[in-house]
Image (cartoon, rainbow, N blue to C red):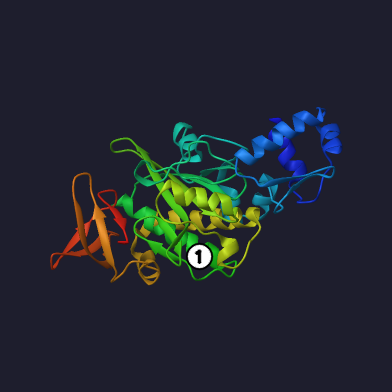
Amino acid sequence: MNRKFCLARLLADGRLHSGERLAHELGVTRAAIAKQVKALNELGLSVHALPRAGYQLVHPIELLDAASIRESLSDMAAASLGRLEIFDELPSTNSHLVDAAPLKPGSFAVCLSEFQTAGRGRRGRVWLAPYASGLCLSFGWSFAEPPQPLSAITLAVGVAVLRCLAQFGITNVQLKWPNDLLHADKKLGGILCELKAEAAGPAFCVIGIGLNVRLPEDSQRAITAHGGLSPTDLATVGTVPSRNRLAGALINELMNTVLTFASQGFAPFFDEWSAADALRDRPVRLVSASTERFGVARGIDSLGYLRAELDGKIEQIASGDVSLRVPL
């Protein structure tokens, strides 16, 4: 394991650790500890160096643990889990599963990473998340006969995340079409679904979820400066659940969601998604590759397409065709 991640584990409890003791634990010099502390700060961890005292995280962190996550799984999810992988660092959890061999229908794979070097959002945007500050989770599932339109799976997953968060007392989160989780118009998380399919064969769907649990203030400022919606986190919304329990609960909900979606499509999720619609009846800006139009969002239809009132007429907007923004 990389020394900087070994150091992160030693500092995870949030207590003050002397440089001498850390150097002894890792078998390196104190100068090497200072170098690794700098590396952790570059990953977004806030490590304070206290003169003649040592090093301390501003907030303790709970690192992801496979055994703890498995303990939170339902019997059905545990029986269907084909592969659970946890990394300190990956380019992208979604890419990792997309490139891996898909499992047979009926079983699923999960990949989590404490940090992503090339995390992706919708339409090629960057997903930024400091080390161990949230969840970067991807769930891979093979649909033997994928329902149509499969693009609505993104909206169904949004409902799954709301159901998961409700288990921890978080009930005031809204959904922004097609794939954002919002609180007070700030971005709490995002969803990215990718498909690998063959003609007339099973479809391997990778569901990626990024969820902010506790973002350091300087990271929030950096994300805002990068563009897009201002971020928020569960710590601001009201509670900081165990990341491992949260991951387990999310996997359970995703398992239930893909099974329901496979047999019934988007219909069982429509009412819950509509009730959480962050943009319904609000002015919006729709941007495509070559045009920009302004109108009013009028909810979604039964297939998960956006209904937008443009120039006095209602148009259906398919997922992936446009970007949606609230005008400034």
114 is higher (above) or lower (below) than 152? above
**Amino acid type, mark 1:** Arg
Residue lying at 82% horizontally and 33% vertically, measured from the top left: 23
Q: Is residue 278 visible?
A: yes
**Quadrant position of the N terminus in the picture:** top right
19 is higher (above) or lower (below) than 266? above
Q: Residue furthest left?
A: 312
Q: Is residue 260 visible?
A: no
- Judged left or right of residue 100, residue 6 is right
Residue lying at 33% horizontally and 55% vertically, measured from the top left: 152
307 is higher (above) or lower (below) than 45? below
Q: Which residue is mark 1?
A: 163
Residue 291 or 176: which is nearer the viewer?
Answer: 291
**Quadrant position of the C terminus in the picture:** bottom left
Residue lying at 84% horizontally and 34% vertically, measured from the top left: 25
Residue 107 or 169: which is nearer the viewer?
Answer: 169
- Judged left or right of residue 95, residue 274 is left
Residue 49 on image: x %, y % = 75, 43
Element under disc 1:
helix
Residue lying at 37% horizontally and 53% vertically, measured from the top left: 153
Residue 178 on image: x %, y % = 35, 56
- Judged left or right of residue 284, residue 105 is right
Q: Residues within 10 Å of mark 1 (few under 14, many from 20)?
A: some
Residue 100 or 223: which is nearer the viewer?
Answer: 223
Residue 88 on image: x %, y % = 63, 38
